[in-house]
């Protein structure tokens, strides 16, 4: 005999209300890149069509991320849970000012790389997947910035790492395979540490939703217990590896100089910043007490990273290796913000991350142009580039000032904020390390500009002798695909230096959202959070 129908109150487990149309922007970045990457992959043999498709989808990605940021600024933190399951049961995408800002800046950089790739990636590179890999890399990057679930942060890391392996070996040169092995081994170790820490965290709390974890950790009588200390140490080591912090940073200068320069530019701009983002999200939002007692360790790592990067840059003669060490030095500045942990310090770290994404991508693209002009990345074989292009010499000087933290460009303001926050926190030695690193970086960039642009010719030639014409590809140098990306990025460097108010406001909102996460919790759980 059939029983009477049972009434089930789905509202206790599921969100039954319709999703506002604007909130669908939360999933747009991953959908656009997945669709674009798949389409480029299916049409990979049509090498003429690849740049058009890739650049078109990357432009759509920029528009979607811009719309998402505007939506977040208008309505606050936005959450969407897969399958309409209420948190913490469903997999959540939760977008705040921090994630939306980094996702937008990352997509702008990727678009610039896609445009540059139209000139620098040959038909073989297009056929074997440059644009599909780039779009799928952005799937992982954007997914990491907007996820609200720590296991899915791990998943998005894996997506971007798999894509980065493909980009790193694109071309199949022996030096690329060597760099890929070094890059891959250490990142796999970091990934395993990340997964182990996440498993332990789930075993303790029974949830991996970031907002739920933040609430449950805060409710503990001793949020700095031994078990959580182990989890925090594992997370720090894993993310430090991915961010290329000292002493696990040797893989970066050993690998970033090996692929096509546009791939190096994307890696330098984006990949290490995802590691820093994960550190901010985990140690400031989820485990603030663990960040507190590890602050001195993080600060020491930051100082070592700052000085290792700056001194390593001074010691290099190969441009891409030199810039790789500058990436490392920048990571030290961001770690300084995590070590201090105040709203001011975290906002400085966010602003510095935005600046570093832009300026390091631009510097690698500039290195590509210098190679087109001279036929070499070796400082000893460069010279006389000022005579070839005074305008480009000026652009490079702007980028050199910016990466050194000198006014009036984008690197100045976040360094001022970070030094101020360090002194306010009683860590004058940390602020001093940021200043010393900036001074050493200025010397390193001054050396590059003098060798490559100011002197008349390469080492061993009479001063004033022109660079060998055989090293110049005039066809590529005259193309908009070469100059437009570096022009866009340099314009942003100048704009954020002269008009920093917008980025200061965004970075402050992003920092407030993780240091005081009431708005983040309300978005996920509703009510008072």
Image (cartoon, rainbow, N blue to C red):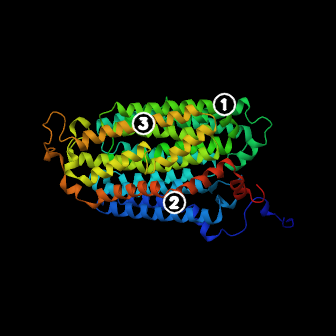
Residue 70 image point, x, y percent:
56, 65
Q: Circle 3 sits on which residue? A: 439
Q: CA distance from mark 2 to mark 1?
A: 34 Å
Q: Nearer the viewer, residue 300 or 171?
A: 300
Locate residue 225: give its quadrant: top right
Left or right of 313 in this view: 329: right
| In this rendering, the label closer to the viewer, 1 or 3 | 3
| In this rendering, the label closer to the viewer, 2 or 3 | 3
Image quarter in which the C terminus is found: bottom right
In the rendered image, the vertical position of residue 385 relative to residue 238, given as above or below: below
Q: CA distance from mark 2 to mark 3?
A: 39 Å
Residue 339 image point, x, y percent:
60, 37
Pick whichever of labels 1 and 3 is earlier in the sequence.
1
Q: Secondary structure at mark 2?
A: helix
Question: Is there any visible trace of residue 262 in the rendered image?
Answer: no
Look at the numbered discs 2 and 3 and tell me whether their residues touch, using CB distance below 8 Å. no
Residue that appears at 49% across and 54% down: 139
Q: Secondary structure at mark 1?
A: helix
Q: Circle 1 sits on which residue? A: 230
Question: Is there any visible trace of residue 227 in the rendered image?
Answer: yes
Q: Secondary structure at mark 3?
A: helix
Disc marking residue 254: none
Residue 207 image point, x, y percent:
71, 45
Pick whichever of labels 2 and 3 is earlier in the sequence.
2
Image quarter in which the N terminus is found: bottom right
Residue 496 image point, x, y percent:
46, 55
Left or right of 448 in this view: 201: right
Q: Circle 2 sits on which residue? A: 29
């Amino acid at each position: 005999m059939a029983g009477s129908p049972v009434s089930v109150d789905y509202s206790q487990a599921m969100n039954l209300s319709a999703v506002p149309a604007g909130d669908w922007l939360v999933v747009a970045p991953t959908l656009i890149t997945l669709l674009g990457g798949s389409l480029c992959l299916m049409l990979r043999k049509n090498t003429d069509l690849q740049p058009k498709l890739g650049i078109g989808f990357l432009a759509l990605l920029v528009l979607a991320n811009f719309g998402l940021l505007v939506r977040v600024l208008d309505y606050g933190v936005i959450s969407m849970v897969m399958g309409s399951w209420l948190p913490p049961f469903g997999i959540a995408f939760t977008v705040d000012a921090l994630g939306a800002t980094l996702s937008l800046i990352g997509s702008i950089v990727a678009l610039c790389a896609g445009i540059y790739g139209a000139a620098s990636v040959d038909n073989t590179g297009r056929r074997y997947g440059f644009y599909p890999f780039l779009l799928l890399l952005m799937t992982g990057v954007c997914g990491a910035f907007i996820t609200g679930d720590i296991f899915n942060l791990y998943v998005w890391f894996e997506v971007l790492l798999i894509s980065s392996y493909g980009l790193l070996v694109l071309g199949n040169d022996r030096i690329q395979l060597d760099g890929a092995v070094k890059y891959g081994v250490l990142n796999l170790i970091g990934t395993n540490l990340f997964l182990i820490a996440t498993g332990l965290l789930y075993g303790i709390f029974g949830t991996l939703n970031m907002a739920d974890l933040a609430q449950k950790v805060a409710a503990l009588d001793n949020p700095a217990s031994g078990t959580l200390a182990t989890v925090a140490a594992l997370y720090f080591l894993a993310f430090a590896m991915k961010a290329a912090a000292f002493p696990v940073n040797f893989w970066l200068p050993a690998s970033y100089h090996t692929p096509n320069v546009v791939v190096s530019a994307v890696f330098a701009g984006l990949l290490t910043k995802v590691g820093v983002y994960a550190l901010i999200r985990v140690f400031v939002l989820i485990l603030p007490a663990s960040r507190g007692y590890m602050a001195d360790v993080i600060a020491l790592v930051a100082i070592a990273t700052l000085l290792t990067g700056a001194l390593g840059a001074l010691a290099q003669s190969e441009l891409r290796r030199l810039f790789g060490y500058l990436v490392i030095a920048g990571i030290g500045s961001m770690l300084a913000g995590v070590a201090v942990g105040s709203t001011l310090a975290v906002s400085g770290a966010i602003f510095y991350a935005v600046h570093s994404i832009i300026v390091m991508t631009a510097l690698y693209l500039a290195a590509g142009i210098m190679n087109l002009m001279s036929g070499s990345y070796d400082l000893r074989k460069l010279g006389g580039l000022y005579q070839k292009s005074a305008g480009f010499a000026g652009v490079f000087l702007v980028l050199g000032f910016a990466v050194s933290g000198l006014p009036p460009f984008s690197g100045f303001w976040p360094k001022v904020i970070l030094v101020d926050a360090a002194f306010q926190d009683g860590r004058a030695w940390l602020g001093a390390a940021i200043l010393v690193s900036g001074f050493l970086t200025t010397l390193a960039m001054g050396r590059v500009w003098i060798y490559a642009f100011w002197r008349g010719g390469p080492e061993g030639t009479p001063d004033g002798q022109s660079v060998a014409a055989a090293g110049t590809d005039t066809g590529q140098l005259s193309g908009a695909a070469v100059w437009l990306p570096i022009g866009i990025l340099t314009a942003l460097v100048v704009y954020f230096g002269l008009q920093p108010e917008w980025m200061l406001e965004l970075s402050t909102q992003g920092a407030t959202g993780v240091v005081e996460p009431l708005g983040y919790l309300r978005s996920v759980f509703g009510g008072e959070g």
